Structure formats: structure tokens, C-alpha cells
Image: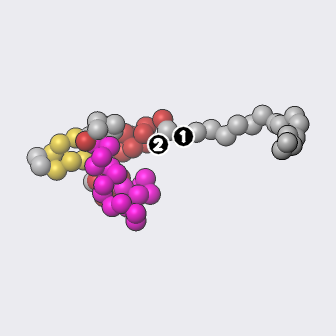
Amino acid sequence: MAEQLLTVEKVARLLGTWETSGERFPRRLIAERRIAFVKVGRHVRIPESAVTAYIAARTVQPITARRTGQRRAA
């Protein structure tokens, strides 16, 4: 089965940027070549795996180390 290609609008909705900036953020990612995309005629489609990889690459894991002491302001 072929991988699903997403529209720019669907990518913006997946990234949570649709309500604030519409298609602007995904289109900037495309223009700056920060995400893989496919040109289908004049249309731009983004593979679902590229969106997943983009999110995974920018996910920050929490620090799990415990604090040993409290600092006081001088």
C-alpha cells in the first residue's frame, strides 16, 4: 500500500498551527526545505512519514534527574 500524501492544510492541522497561522507554517517549512515534500503538478503534498519524522526530530524529552538541593536567592 502506498504512503498517504497530505495536503498543506492537513499538515497544518496535524501540527496544530491551522488556527493561528493557517497554511503559513507548513509552507515555510517547504520553502526552507526543512520537510520533505512531493510536487504533483502545481500542488504540493507532504508524505505522512515526513510529518511524523519532523515531529519526532523536534520532540524534547523531559529531564528526569532529581534536584539535590534548594537554592535560595541572595
Dot 1 falls on a residue whose secondary structure is loop
Q: Position of residue 24 (x, y in %)?
A: 30, 55
Q: Residues within 10 Å of mark 2 (few under 14, many from 20)?
A: few
**Can residue 21 be found in the magenta stretch?**
yes
Question: On the picture, is 11 further left or further right than 38?
Answer: right
Farthest-out residue, left:
41
> What residue appears at the point 15 percent right and 45 percent down from the top-left corner?
40
> What residue appears at the point 42 percent right and 39 percent down from the top-left corner?
54
Q: Is residue 69 above or below residue 23?
A: above
Instruction: Name the amino acid, label 1.
Output: Thr
Farthest-out residue, front:
74
Residue 2 visible from this viewpoint: no
Question: On the picture, is 36 further left or further right than 17?
Answer: left
Q: CA distance from mark 1 to mark 2?
A: 6 Å
Q: Residues within 10 Å of mark 1 (few under 14, many from 20)?
A: few
Question: Which label is found at residue 59?
Answer: 1
Q: Quadrant of the C terminus?
A: top right
Dot 2 falls on a residue whose secondary structure is helix
Q: Is residue 70 above or below residue 7?
A: above
Q: Which residues are magenta?
A: 12-30
Q: Position of residue 58 (x, y in %)?
A: 49, 38
Q: Quadrant of the N terminus?
A: top left
Residue beneath disc 2: 55
> What residue appears at the point 27 percent right and 54 percent down from the top-left corner?
7
Instruction: Name the amino acid, label 2.
Output: Ile
Residue 62 visible from this viewpoint: yes
**In the depicted view, which residue is nearer to us: 40 or 18?**
18
